[in-house]
Image (cartoon, grey):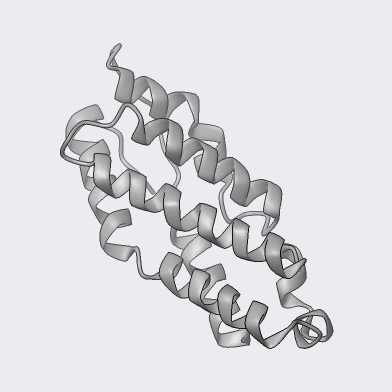
Amino acid sequence: MSRTAALLVTAVVAVTALAGCGGDDPYCAAVKEHQAALDTFGEKRTNAGFAAYAEAVRAIASTAPDTSKDDWAKLGSVTDGVLTAQKKAGITLQDMADTDKVGELDPDDLSTLNDAYDTFNGTTKQRTAVVKDVKDVCDITLK
């Protein structure tokens, strides 16, 4: 489980921050509006931070151009999947580093969590695509 948790933490940290957004384009405006949630994602490994990121991604997906809409939607879906799995298991993201708490999880819940984390960690292609799309469409460089 600690390997999966470490991969999730790596993915969380790897998700990028946004800098500036120009124009009145709804997509770019949505990126700018949710910049704080995107900028801070991974700094605090909490359910609240993860939920704010999921909300931001969903909002951006709703305005995204066809070039990235599916990628944004996938990121929102897998992030929601992690939150749902954690809620079902009765554990928070911040408690995933506590081996005693993780050790108390029901094996089915642990399996569900691992699947959700693996799915989230498997979105490298989508994260790369949205970074490129935001740069191309909004001239925003993601860090």
Q: Is residue 111 above or below residue 137?
A: below
138 left or right, relative to 98 = left
Q: Residue at x 52, y 61 (%)?
A: 12
Position of residue 86 relative to residue 137, above or below, is: below
* Residue at (57, 75) in percent of width and height: 112
- Outermost residue, front direction? 108
Q: Quadrant of the N terminus?
A: bottom right
Q: Is residue 43 above or below residue 52?
A: below
Residue occupying the point 56% across, 38% down: 37
Side of 66 where 48 appears, left or right = right
The quadrant where residue 95 appears: bottom right
Residue 21 lies in what quarter of the image?
Answer: top left
Residue 61 percent across, percent down from the top left: 35, 36
Query: On the rendered structure, is 143 left or right of 108?
Result: left
Q: Residue placed at 83% from the left, 85% from the top?
A: 100
Give the total of numbered labels: 0
In this rendered view, identify the residue nearer to me: 82 or 131. Answer: 82
Residue 98 visible in the picture:
yes
- Horizontal and vertical percent for residue 35? 49, 33
Q: Is residue 39 visible?
A: no
The image shows residue 66 at horizontal and vertical percentages of 17, 35
Residue 69 position by quadrant: top left
Is 36 on the left-hand or right-hand side of 63? right
